[in-house]
């Protein structure tokens, strides 16, 4: 009897161990990449409709995988977000660096090989008004906002690669928050300035046969002598239309992203941000050439946008057709300074003008 009881005890212990192993098998042999088989079975029993097809739809980002009908909330996993991130990090960001670096390198190479364009004849001391005060106000308003928006935009796109590793967490967060807010709030103000500039100067920017000859000579690089030009040459007109079409694309896409409370879907916002980034990078790369030509690249060009007046020699060399139309309006530099001084005194003492 003792022997049988002892055997029954061992048999019971072995049976319990075997039962434990058998019950543990479903949890070990769970499908790879998903919940345990028993957990999935329990979920399917608790929530009817959670089939294998349902989980495939969830992982594929299919709309309707949740009961919510709010925009963007009816999809459990937004796979488009990962696609947008790949486009931004693997195409837009590297492409922007290539465009910006290539533009800067090309300008540097041109400056080293060709150098700045100097005046062919000495200055005469007689000045012609080229840009009115309104022209200059619009230009510097748009240019200032463009520089600020360009800087903050580049920080939002690239700063995480070189600033985040070296800045304390709090400083990094404050810097990026400031860059984002400045970019978002100044964008609509830039849009107003851009529209004003387009409306103010569009009448001067229709292409004509003179521009074709200007392009054929490469703006004076090919052949001898400077090509003829009217109030604006072919290169300036090209820049105007780049600013118009690419600039409006950047502005419209920026406004869509700036005001997400008009029913835009998340996919629309993602596409808009890609278009905005690509357009802005193209515009910045092209602006390097405009800035170079308007400053160090052409003697006398910057003073025109700074003071509104250019010397006769500059006007005759770069815009001869326009010069011949307005040369009778040229005044001596001393007379111009006297006029400015008189206007300043009148502005300071308005009672003298009454």
Image (tube, helix red, strand yellow):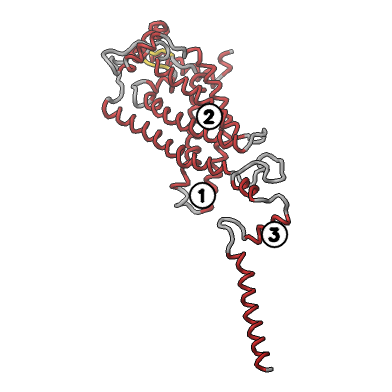
Q: On the rendered structure, is 254 left or right of 321?
A: right
Crowding around mark 3 (Cα neighbors within 10 Å: few <14, some 14 to 19, many 20+) is few
Give the spatial CA distance, label 1 vs label 3.
46 Å
Q: Earlier in the sequence, mark 1 or mark 3?
A: 3
Q: Based on the displayed image, in which of its 4 quarters is residue 115 positioned? A: top left
Q: Based on the displayed image, in which of its 4 quarters is residue 338 positioned? A: top left
Whether label 2 touches label 3, CB < 8 Å = no
Residue 316 coordinates in the image, percent (x, y): 34, 11
Residue name at image x 35 percent, y 13 percent: 214
Residue under label 2: 250
Q: On the rendered structure, is 9 left or right of 94?
A: right
Is residue 217 shown above or below 180? Answer: above
In depth, the one of 353 and 199 nearer the eye is: 199
Residue 254 coordinates in the image, percent (x, y): 56, 32
Residue under label 1: 172
In depth, the one of 150 and 275 nearer the eye is: 275
Residue under label 3: 42
Helix, strand or loop for disc 2: helix
- Tally of marks: 3
Q: What number is the disc on residue 307?
A: none
Helix, strand or loop for disc 1: helix
Is residue 182 shown above or below 345? Answer: below
Q: On the rendered structure, is 313 left or right of 33?
A: left
The quarter of the picture where the C terminus appears is: top right
Residue 70 coordinates in the image, percent (x, y): 70, 40
Q: On the rendered structure, is 213 left or right of 58?
A: left
């Amino acid at each position: 009897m003792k022997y049988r009881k002892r055997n029954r005890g061992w048999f019971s212990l072995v049976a319990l161990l075997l039962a434990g192993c058998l019950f543990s098998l479903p949890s070990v042999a769970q499908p790879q990449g998903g919940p345990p088989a028993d957990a999935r079975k329990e979920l399917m029993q608790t929530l009817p409709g959670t089939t294998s097809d349902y989980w495939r739809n969830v992982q594929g980002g299919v709309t309707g995988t949740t009961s919510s009908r709010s925009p963007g909330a009816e999809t459990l996993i937004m796979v488009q977000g990962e696609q947008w991130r790949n486009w931004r990090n693997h195409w837009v960001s590297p492409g922007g660096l290539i465009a910006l670096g290539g533009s800067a390198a090309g300008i540097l190479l041109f400056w080293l090989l060709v150098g700045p364009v100097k005046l062919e004849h000495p200055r005469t001391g007689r000045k012609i008004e080229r840009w009115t005060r309104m022209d200059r106000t619009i230009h510097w308003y748009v240019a200032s906002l463009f520089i600020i928006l360009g800087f903050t935009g580049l920080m939002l796109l690239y700063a995480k690669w070189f600033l985040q590793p070296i800045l304390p967490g709090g400083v990094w967060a404050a810097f990026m928050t400031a860059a984002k807010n400045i970019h978002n709030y100044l964008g609509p103000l830039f849009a107003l300035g851009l529209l004003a500039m387009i409306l103010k100067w569009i009448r001067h920017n229709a292409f004509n046969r003179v521009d074709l000859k200007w392009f054929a000579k490469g703006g004076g690089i090919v052949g001898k002598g400077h090509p003829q030009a009217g109030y604006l040459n072919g290169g300036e007109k090209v820049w105007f239309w780049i600013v118009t079409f690419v600039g409006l694309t950047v502005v419209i896409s920026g406004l869509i992203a700036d005001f997400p409370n008009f029913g835009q879907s998340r996919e629309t916002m993602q596409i808009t941000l890609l278009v905005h980034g690509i357009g802005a990078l193209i515009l910045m790369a092209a602006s390097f050439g405009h800035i170079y030509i308007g400053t160090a690249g052409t003697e006398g060009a910057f003073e025109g946008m700074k003071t509104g007046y250019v010397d006769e020699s500059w006007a005759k060399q770069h815009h001869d057709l326009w010069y011949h139309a307005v040369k009778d309006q040229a005044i001596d530099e001393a007379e111009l300074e006297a006029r400015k001084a008189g206007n300043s005194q009148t502005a300071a003492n308005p009672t003298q003008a009454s």
